[in-house]
Image (cartoon, helix red, strand yellow):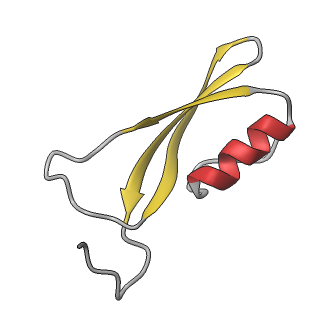
Amino acid sequence: MRELLGLPLAEAEATLVAAGYRVTSVETKSRKGQPGNEKRVLRVRKTAESEMELIYALFKTDLFWMPE
């Protein structure tokens, strides 16, 4: 399986589902709670034989994006 760290969450989820895994996604935040516009994978963990957990956070990847 290809490396998933740093990928957009939707792309990582689709990759795992296509490989036959059931996926759980969990958001994490920094202590400062900085706003972001794109969900990126920080950690991938196998939780059972056919289950994976993705830990993700919001990153500001668009230089001109402003929180509402």
Q: Position of residue 32 (x, y in %)?
A: 13, 52
Quadrant for the C terminus in the image: bottom left
Which residue of the protein is positioned furthest toward the front in this rendering?
68
| Residue 15 horizontal side relative to residue 34, left or right | right
Q: Quadrant of residue 48?
A: top right
In-front residue for pair 5/20: 20
Which residue of the protein is positioned furthest toward the left in this rendering?
32
Q: Position of residue 31 (x, y in %)?
A: 16, 45
Residue 7 sits above or below residue 1 on the image: below
Q: Residue at x 86, y 35 (%)?
A: 19
Which residue of the protein is positioned furthest toward the bottom in this rendering?
64
| Residue 35 horizontal side relative to residue 38, left or right | left
Q: Residue at x 69, y 54 (%)?
A: 11
Q: Position of residue 27 (x, y in %)?
A: 39, 39
Q: Residue at x 40, y 49 (%)?
A: 57
Q: Quadrant of residue 58?
A: bottom left
Residue 30 sits above or below residue 35 on the image: above
Residue 20 sits above or below residue 14 on the image: above
Quadrant for the N terminus in the image: top right
Q: Residue at x 37, y 85 (%)?
A: 63
Which residue of the protein is positioned furthest toward the right in this rendering?
19
Residue 21 sits above or below residue 55 on the image: above
Q: Quadrant of residue 49?
A: top right
Say how many tags the image has. Answer: 0
